[in-house]
Image (spheres, rainbow, N blue to C red):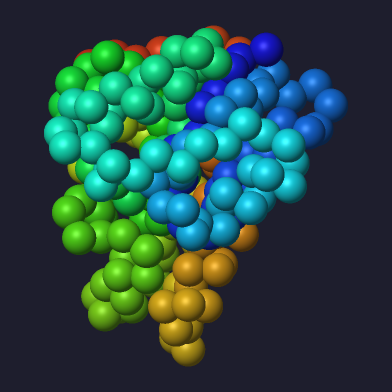
Amino acid sequence: MLKIGVLVSSGGTNLQAMIDACETNGYPAKIVSVISSRSKAFAVERAKKHGLPCEVILKKQYEEQGAYEAAIIKNFETQSVELIVMAGFLTVLDGSFFERYENRIMNIHPSLIPAFCGKGFYGLKVHEAVLEAGVKVTGATVQFAIEETDAGPIILQKAVDVFDDDTAEVLQKRVMEEAEWKILPEAVRLFAEGKIEVIGNRTRVNK
Ligand code: GRF
């Protein structure tokens, strides 16, 4: 059983998708730790409701970035975390963190990377930019996270239609329901089953 640690900062619907998957018979992973960078994140309530170990670690509690990250690492090492899932995690981490867990940190992003991604593209801003650009298709991407935002090896992507009357909120919900909540647990399953091979900045997924 693959042990996963989940990093959250917000509503936690992707955390919920992971919780639901892990509670399904035969799913090859389990959540052993949830860390939130915001005390008021609803994700914390979701973790508690399911009896998952959950710690709020605030960056402002630490004078240095290194000490903040050391606290996260200590938690994950104590729980023997093998894969980290960033599920709506909004706090910046240093390159050394990503190097330590190379190809063992997954991130979910609500667009088809390399479109609508990178610095400043988070939350509703992504969907607002999609509507502004007038594209007819958007979606979501799961990738291994590296220091550079949204630039790591892509694992899975799923396309979602954009409709003429969409608002950013409506589109965000559709992207979550039709793409994010499906491909994130699927990517974790593939990882747990050893089906993801990383070749340079690309992956080969043997489904
Ligand atoms: C999701 O859209 C995710 O792709 C992005 O941040 C949002 C987090 O939502 N990285 P939630 O906290 O999982 O509900």
Outermost residue, right direction? 25
Question: Which of the pair 26/135 is nearer the observer?
Answer: 26
Q: Which quadrant is home to the N terminus? A: top right
Q: Is residue 179 visible?
A: no
Query: Is residue 148 depicted above or below 121 in this figure?
Result: above
Outermost residue, bottom direction? 165
Left/right placement of residue 185 relative to residue 62 reads right
Query: Is residue 164 depicted above or below 101 in this figure?
Result: below
Residue 198 x/y as whole percent: 34, 15
In percent of the image, x 32 and y 76: which residue is there? Answer: 128
Question: Which of the pair 119/189 is nearer the observer?
Answer: 119
Residue 98 x/y as whole percent: 25, 24
Left/right placement of residue 152 relative to residue 13 reads left
Question: Which of the pair 97/14 is nearer the observer?
Answer: 97
In percent of the image, x 54 and y 16: which residue is there? Answer: 79
In percent of the image, x 66 and y 24: which residue is there? Answer: 30
Query: Is residue 171 depicted above or below 119 in this figure?
Result: below
Dividing the picture into quarters, in which one does residue 104 lie? top left
Q: Is residue 64 visible?
A: yes
Dividing the picture into quarters, in which one does residue 72 lie? top left
Left/right placement of residue 189 relative to residue 147 reads right
Question: Which of the pair 107/33 is nearer the observer?
Answer: 33
Q: Which quadrant is home to the C terminus? A: top right
Residue 109 x/y as whole percent: 38, 49
Residue 32 x/y as whole percent: 61, 24
Number of labels in the image equals 0
In percent of the image, x 74 and y 41: which residue is there? Answer: 50
